[in-house]
Amino acid sequence: YIAPLPVFTWTGFYVGLNAGAAFRVGNDNNNNGFFGGNNNGGNSAGFVGGGQLGYNWQSGAIVWGLETDAQYRSNIGNTANNGFFNGGNSNNGGFYGTTRGRLGYAFSPMVMAYITGGAAYGNVANNGFNPFGFGFNTNNGSNFRLGWTGGAGVEFAMTPNWSIKAEALYNDLGRSNQNAFFGNNTRNTFVVARLGV
């Protein structure tokens, strides 16, 4: 007697590691009122990596579940400067994580594409600089911020117990104001592209 092979299913608990790159989406708006201003935007890239855990349920070809992850995100800062009265500001990396729902479709028993979305959170280091004392630096230092994330990915099961995935997430942790009086703002948005196992 030869026992039949078990039918593969995505249902179950999983835990793993991931690594990739974070790309800053620059959108800095500087306006020092009567004295004019400028807009500084910039994109830069940095490392992101960490771990994830979650649970899947499968019904036919539909797979849905929940996933949370905790990451380290290196500096993907952007510096803005609107001249004589306002100095500059920067946005740096640090702790970053998400808690998301996932909805997937299994095109074959071991290949699934999915969309995902939910909450994003992390530390954002914004450093306002106002050398002449005009306005107020309202958001200096490291701040924990809550925002949202959304994206998509594809996952391939190499064996019944091991899978690999590739995914991309857009993240928005809100806007920071470095100078309330003259208006020097940094938007904390970035894209993460990563591989996981």
Image (tube, rainbow, N blue to C red):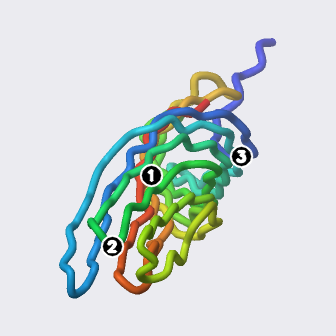
User: Which residue appears at 38% of the width and 72% of the height?
Assistant: 185
The kind of residue on which mark 2 rests is Phe
138, 9: nearer the viewer: 138
Q: Position of residue 107 (x, y in %)?
A: 42, 40
Do the residues bearing badges 3 and 2 touch, measured as CB atoms within 8 Å? no
CA distance for labels 3 and 1? 17 Å
User: Which residue appears at 46% of the width and 50% of the height?
Assistant: 114
Closer to viewer: mark 3 or mark 1: 1
First reached walking from the N terminus: tag 2 or tag 1: 2
Marks counted in the figure total 3
Mark 1: secondary structure = strand
Horizontal side of residue 119 vs 134, given as left or right? right
Q: Position of residue 75 (x, y in %)?
A: 50, 43
49, 89: nearer the viewer: 89
Say if residue 166 shows up in the picture.
Answer: no
Label 1 packing within 10 angstroms: few (<14), some (14-19), many (20+): many
First reached walking from the N terminus: tag 3 or tag 2: 3
User: Which residue appears at 41% of the width and 73% of the height?
Assistant: 132
Closer to viewer: mark 2 or mark 1: 2
The kind of residue on which mark 1 rests is Leu
Q: Which residue is mark 3?
A: 53
78, 181: nearer the viewer: 181
First reached walking from the N terminus: tag 3 or tag 1: 3
Q: Which residue is mark 2?
A: 85
